[in-house]
């Protein structure tokens, strides 16, 4: 299974803020990989999303952000596992499917950014 969190990242002692930032970093990493595999020109990288409004955010907004960022990170992992499995099988993923994965990850990052910019 693919995971992006460093081995030293301990979820039991990590703050929810650090977990959220780590999930976002994993989605950004997956986006870069997907764009590279798809042969897409690396466009403007999405601005790093740092939920600076986290301390002032309501519990509902935090839960929404958590749910959405977890789903985005899981989608990124699933997409990259699909690419790795196809490569291991000796086949290449269809370029349009990899491009779609990259576009979806970029869209998720933009949506997550909006949660803390409202």
Image (cartoon, helix red, strand yellow):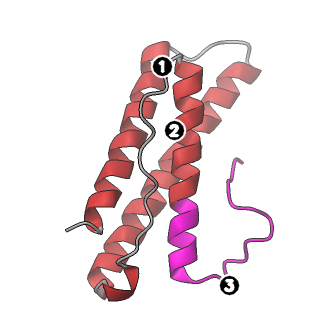
Please tell me which residue is depicted at 53% across the width and 66% down the height of the picture: 21
Question: In this rendering, is residue 64 above or below 32?
Answer: below
Q: Which of 55 and 104 is in front in this view?
A: 55
Q: Which of marks 2 and 3 is nearer the N terminus?
A: 3
Point out which mark residue 12 bears. 3
Q: Can residue 36 be seen in this view?
A: yes
Please tell me which residue is depicted at 54% across the width and 30% down the height of the picture: 34
- Left or right: 111 with respect to 102? left
Q: How far apart are marks 1 and 3 (CA)?
A: 38 Å
- Left or right: 58 with respect to 3? left
Q: Is residue 33 shown in magenta?
A: no
Q: Which of marks 2 and 1 is nearer the N terminus?
A: 2
Estimate how packed mark 1 is, as few (under 14), some (14 to 19) or many (20 or more) residues with alpha carbons within 10 Å.
some
The boundaries of the magenta stretch are 1-23
Q: Is residue 78 visible?
A: no
Please tell me which residue is depicted at 52% across the width and 49% down the height of the picture: 27
Residue on which disc 2 sits = 31
Q: Position of residue 55 (x, y in %)?
A: 39, 87
For mark 1, give the secondary structure. Answer: loop
């Amino acid at each position: 299974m693919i995971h992006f969190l460093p081995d030293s990242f301990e979820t039991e002692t990590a703050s929810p803020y650090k977990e959220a930032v780590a999930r976002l970093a994993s989605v950004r990493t997956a986006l870069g990989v997907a764009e590279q595999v798809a042969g897409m020109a690396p466009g403007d990288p999405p601005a790093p999303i740092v939920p600076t409004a986290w301390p002032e955010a309501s519990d509902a907004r935090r839960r929404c952000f958590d749910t959405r960022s977890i789903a985005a990170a899981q989608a990124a992992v699933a997409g990259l596992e699909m690419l790795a499995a196809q490569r291991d099988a000796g086949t290449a993923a269809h370029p349009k499917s990899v491009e779609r994965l990259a576009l979806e990850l970029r869209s998720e990052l933009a949506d997550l950014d909006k949660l803390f910019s409202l």
